[in-house]
Image (tube, rainbow, N blue to C red):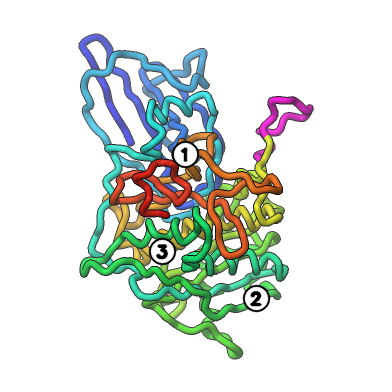
Amino acid sequence: MHEKISNHMTTTTIIIFINVNDAPLGPTPLPSLHFKNLTVLHYPQINVSLHTLKLDVLYFGALCSLTSHPFTMFSTAVPIFTLLSLSLLLAPVQGWRPWPASSNITAYALGDSKKYEGSSEFVKLRYHMGPVMSTNITVHTIWYGTWSPSQKKIIREFINSISATSSPHPSVSGWWRTVQLYTDQTGANISRTVKLGEEKNDRFYSHGKSLTRLSIQSVIRSAITASTRPLPINPRSGLYLLLTSHDVYVQDFCTSVCGFHYFTFPSLVGYTLPYAWVGNSAKLCPGYCAYPFALPAMFVPPSPSPNNRKPFKSPNGDVGVDGMISVIAHEMAELATNPLANAWYAGQDPSFPVEIADLCEGIYGTGGGGSYTGQVLDARDGATYNMNGIRRKFLVQWVWSHVLNYCTGPNALDHSSSLNH
């Protein structure tokens, strides 16, 4: 998003970069960069894409020079009188993970209100007349690589918890209720029922331990065309979830994404199937993709200090898998509301959509934003969570409500979010 602001004395260019990635690697925590007559702002609820920032800095490099304080978090060079232009810089459909920004600007982003987490007059989420997943959703999981029974159980129970209305408040099903509010052009809501379908194990890494975005579709093709127990082909209500184990690298994993979603190409797979990929970051980059259950190395000083940041204790005793849960939730919510990239999203280009989970990156509770997850819950064993599922607890990011026009979740303290109860 670019803004140009001027008055009678001086012209200052302010560039605001919004990373709308579906699941950015908890982006490299960049402070705001300041130049003569050019300011790059980093809002704590808006993650900054490193490659986008570099490109734009190069582009404007001829127009400005660094000041002596290049890493000042925020400043206003001149009084603001006229807003001349505003546009979005969008990124491909990919997954995100919350990375903490510097905590000293959290208050700036939140203002005086703790009610409207993520709300913005600039958010123009629109329906583009495409289909949503309004019939009972069946999740077909592909376990690629080495997975333990306990890891599979955590993920299965999260998916089953989406429709488990008997779970105590705040619940995973309460979180899904916000997703259910979205409709198609006939007025049909997204399905309340999400169930596990048939699964496929690929424990021998049939396509290797390094996958590209296209080879991920090849893995799905292998799963639906296998000679023994192939996955069923269900373009209308099937959701194909490819999960890669801790020793598998996927293109852009740990550098810009932790997961992404799209649909398969008939030329590669034979069918158009909504799918998502999420990786286990336990060995490769837990500080990026399993935050806040692990911290980036730069957040852990070499010597112990009372002020050192500490990671949260994961609710199910597996940092990698507990970190995956929120990414899986993120992708499922967006697949349900935008399965073919032509339904619910913000922005003009369906190839670069800002979707309902993108808008709430890093927000897990009331007051969330920046380095602060929001008000979450502590279990008796000291683990951190924000919603209950079947026999388990989970930490899951919030999603955007087009009814309330802000991010919400079942653990919201504001009474107006009772629709999630």
User: Which of these two is toward me, 276 or 360?
Assistant: 360
User: Which of these two is toward me, 391 or 2?
Assistant: 391
Residue 202 is labelled as 2
Q: Earlier in the sequence, mark 1 or mark 3?
A: 1
Quadrant housing the C terminus: bottom left
Residue at x 42% of width, y 25% of height: 108
Magenta span: 295-309
The reply to whether the magenta stretch includes residue 317 is no
**Residue 355 visible from this viewpoint:** no
User: Which of these two is toward me, 5 or 164?
Assistant: 164
Label 1: few (<14), some or many (≥20) within 10 Å?
A: many
Label 3: few (<14), some or many (≥20) within 10 Å?
A: many
Residue picked out by circle 1: 47
Residue at x 37% of width, y 50% of height: 418
Residue 62: give x, y in percent of width and height.
Answer: 39, 24
Helix, strand or loop for the magenta stretch, by majority: loop
Is residue 369 rendered to the left or right of residue 304? left
Is residue 187 rendered to the left or right of residue 297? left
Residue 334: give x, y in percent of width and height.
Answer: 41, 59
Query: Of all residues shown, which one is farthest toward the right?
Result: 303
